[in-house]
Amino acid sequence: MIVPRALPLFLLAAGLAACDFTPAAERLPNFVIIYIDDMGYADIGPFGAEGYETPNLDRMAKEGRRFTNFYVTQAVCSASRAGLVTGCYNVRVGILGALNHRANHGIHADEMTIGELVKQRGYATACFGKWHLGHHPKFLPTNNGFDEYLGLPYSNDMWPGHPTAGKNYPDLPLIEGTKIVDANVTAEDQEQLTTLYTRRAVRFIERNKDRPFLVYLPHSMVHVPLHVSDKFRGKSPRGLFGDVVMEIDWSVGQILDALRKHNLDSRTMVVFTSDNGPWLSYGDHAGSAKPLREGKGTMFDGGCRVPTVMRWPGRIPADTVCDTPAMTIDLLPTIAHLAGAPLPDRKIDGKNIWPLVAGEPGATSPHEAYYFYYGNELQAVRMGKWKLHFPHGYRTLSGRKGGTGGRPVPYDNARIELALFNLETDVGETADVKDRHPEVVAAIQKLAGAIREDLGDSARKIKGAGTRPAGQLAEGDLRFDWQPGVPNPAEAQARPAAKR
């Protein structure tokens, strides 16, 4: 096995020492959020995966609760992560699409992250994995509520090894804190990413076992390019994709074992979910959203409904299912409720869903509806069992197979007109029933009118009154800047913009 140049640095690094804690703080619950990249609805055993085994996720579901109607704010990387981290629709906080090495914006310092939320209660916090909310130092996790950070600043395909756009990308950096500690992440290095993030998370849990902690573990996989360590290479009949999912499952097992080893099971809520559906154009290097429609990059359910499991022995009922819609924006206020932490002063969109998570009798959604934007365009609204799509364009393979060996095939452009779907009877969003339920269409359109006033709608040229800007680089801010074809120094130091 090839050992990455930078790996020993991370495996030997001790990290931050545990701080003092009070007896009251010791009794607070811990939180672990495992966020997978581009994992489709049917990519794990509890949701019907085929061709490989996920025994640890099966165990997690057996000991916890599956959420069959759990959504992200948008079916694309940075936008989805903004929703999870802030408890807001990403359009509210000005984060759209997938930020790359040229982006001079990121999460705004005035937004409260889940890390900052629990630090109000004395928590130790860490993020290990893909951040993707701005790569310049002011936007990185350690400047936004996390005590520790190790990971890639954006997607692992934003590098010279990209099969079709490599010339557009500089070398891929690995960052610890706010320092670039490996300026040229190679394919061999990527094989170790899942292991690296997992080991750091486990060690963080061990060091902080006697105080409350929050671990955010946003894996780089199963985003292309797929890479897997020797532990799982060639282990799956499904090929490389199956190998990679099996290693993600191993990672989940390592986290659960660490909690059990340190008697933290009864004090720790673990959430496993994904940032969006599968990148279908990559074919055998992508997962499956079966039986949902479409995938990543669309706001059909195949793009924005994600496999989700939550576990907390003694608090979350074992081997149960929640079919009520919920969304990643609801995690922050739910964690605030459980940790007794004050919510942000500014408006957020998520609501406390603990009654749903805990399986309380008669629990219902605290939301009247969920709103699905792509970019700044309101494309759909889900109200109970109904989902109304407004006219919009979308990408599709039109029934064709995706690519092979890590190379994608092109999408077709398609368009949907106003359409209403009953997701209880038509999970694949295939049968438009708007003509049979005009009263439902009218009710959802009324809700859409209100959200457009708040968050806007580019399709109707409406600017929302409740949106806030993303953070921007200012003169004098520290920054990381590099260009394709220009190698980074072995140890890159941030430089004041004013001196460039």
Image: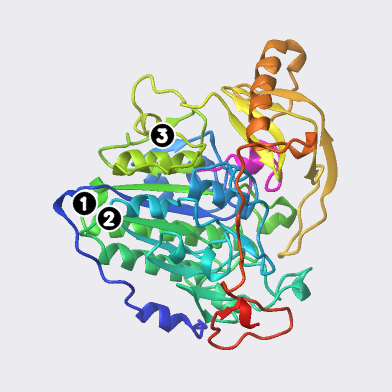
Identify the residue at horizontal 43%, vertical 44% (top origin). 344
Helix, strand or loop at label 1? It is helix
Is residue 469 visible to the viewer in this orientation of the structure? Answer: yes
Residue name at image x 32 percent, y 44 percent: 341
State which region is magenta. 287-307
Disc 3 from disc 2: Cα separation: 21 Å
Q: Quadrant of residue 485?
A: bottom right
Q: Which residue is under mark 1?
A: 25
The amino acid type found where label 3 is placed reads Asn
Label 2 and label 1: CA atoms lie apart by 7 Å
Q: Are marks 2 and 1 in contact (CB under 8 Å)?
A: yes
The image shows residue 431, relative to residue 258, as above or below, that is above
Residue on which disc 2 sits: 122
In depth, the one of 372 and 250 nearer the eye is 372
Q: Residues within 10 Å of mark 1 (few under 14, many from 20)?
A: some
According to the picture, the residue beneath numbered tag 3 turns out to be 352
Please report contact status of discs 3 and 2: CB closer than 8 Å, yes or no. Answer: no
**Residue 62 can be seen in this image:** no
Q: Which three-letter amino acid code belongs to the residue tagged 2?
A: Gly
Q: What percent of the width, then of the height, locates residue 127? A: 43, 62
Q: Position of residue 207 (x, y in %)?
A: 26, 67
N-terminal label among 2 and 1: 1
Q: Earlier in the sequence, mark 3 or mark 1?
A: 1
> Between tags 3 and 2, which lies in front?
2
Question: Is 344 within the magenta?
Answer: no
Q: Position of residue 500 (x, y in %)?
A: 65, 82
CA distance for labels 3 and 1: 21 Å
Q: Tag 3: Cα neighbours inside 10 Å, few (<14), some, or many (≥20)?
A: many
Judge by depth and name the residue closer to the eye, 234 or 58.
58
